[in-house]
């Protein structure tokens, strides 16, 4: 799985995770493990009363994720920005550089090319050069560049907290990543969606071929998919670079 795949996945919402998680409010218990730096916060959907105290870190992680999801639902990019880690913005910055450069999408993974062209559709070469990673993140949310958004509260079976990193666990496996920066817990989108890249890539490319026809080439399929998403025709020149 390459870094460009991870970069594109930053524009996706939590839908892939939400689909595998229950939205039922959970009670909590705590299970300590031998490593002193690690705490497992297990959750259940039973009505049994809680007999232990939820660690502050788990409360803050939950609040960060809920805040991010609420900002997505409100299409409030500036608010969502406060809940993501610096790694998220580093990756958005790299993606912005690709959109602003005369780089043909044939040199990119299929799902990377989608966001690059969508950015080129909205901004000229000069405008892209003036944008920041934060601008791109906010635009992705404010203007609906996300593929989909979660409709329900995401729940986990447990939180695995180790120093300044944490994961939300589902059925014993990590489903979402978090990082603590400046004393606050943030949603680590890049690390999270890297895990979902292979499946999402296949799904998007298959969808593009379904729209364009099995005999369509890569570029034609991409343009067909983008035209469907944007509800307008896409200038093929945007595949090669930004407009002047």
Image: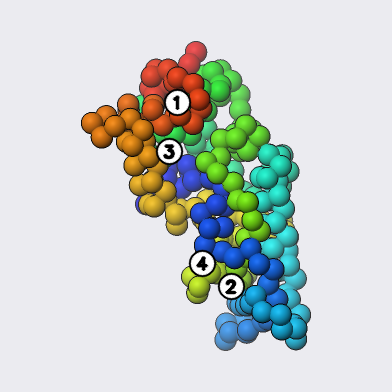
What coloring was used for the rendering?
rainbow
Find the distance from the CA under tag 1 to the CA under tag 4.
Answer: 35 Å
Find the distance from the CA under tag 1 to the CA under tag 2.
Answer: 39 Å
CB-based contact (under 8 Å), mark 3 and mark 4? no
CB-based contact (under 8 Å), mark 4 and mark 2? no
Find the distance from the CA under tag 3 to the CA under tag 1.
Answer: 16 Å
Crowd tier of the residue under label 3, counting other residues whose Cα lies within 10 Å: few below 14, some 14–19, many 20 or above: many
Q: Of marks 3 and 4, which one's residue comes earlier in the chain?
A: 3
The answer to whether residue 42 shows anywhere in this view is: yes
Q: Residue furthest left?
A: 215
**Mark 4 highlights which residue?**
174
Q: Of marks 1 and 2, which one's residue comes earlier in the chain?
A: 2
Question: Where is residue 78 shown, x and y percent of the image?
Answer: 72, 39
**Mark 2 highlights which residue?**
157
**Where residue 227 is drawn, which disc sits there?**
1
Quarter location, residue 76: top right
- Disc number lying in front (4 or 2): 2
- Disc number lying in front (3 or 1): 1
Quarter location, residue 205: top left
């Amino acid at each position: 799985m390459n870094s460009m795949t991870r970069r594109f996945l930053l524009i996706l919402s939590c839908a892939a995770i939400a689909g595998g998680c229950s939205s039922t409010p959970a009670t909590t218990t705590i299970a300590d493990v031998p490593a002193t730096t690690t705490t497992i916060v297990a959750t259940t959907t039973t009505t049994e009363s809680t007999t232990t105290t939820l660690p502050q870190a788990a409360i803050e992680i939950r609040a960060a994720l809920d805040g991010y999801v609420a900002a997505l639902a409100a299409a409030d990019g500036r608010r969502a920005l406060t809940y993501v880690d610096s790694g998220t913005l580093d990756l958005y910055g790299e993606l912005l550089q690709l959109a602003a450069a005369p780089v043909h999408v044939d040199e990119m993974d299929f799902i990377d090319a989608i966001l690059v062209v969508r950015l080129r559709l909205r901004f000229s070469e000069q405008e892209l050069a003036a944008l920041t990673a934060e601008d791109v993140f906010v635009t992705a949310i404010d203007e609906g560049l996300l593929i989909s958004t979660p409709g329900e509260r995401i729940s986990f079976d447990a939180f695995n907290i180790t120093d300044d990193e944490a994961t939300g666990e589902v059925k014993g496996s990590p489903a979402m990543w978090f990082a603590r920066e400046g004393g606050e817990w943030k949603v680590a989108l890049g690390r999270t969606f890297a895990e979902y890249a292979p499946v999402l890539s296949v799904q998007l490319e298959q969808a593009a071929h379904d729209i364009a026809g099995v005999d369509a080439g890569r570029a034609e399929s991409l343009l067909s998919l983008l035209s469907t998403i944007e509800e307008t025709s896409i200038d093929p020149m945007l595949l090669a670079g930004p407009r002047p």
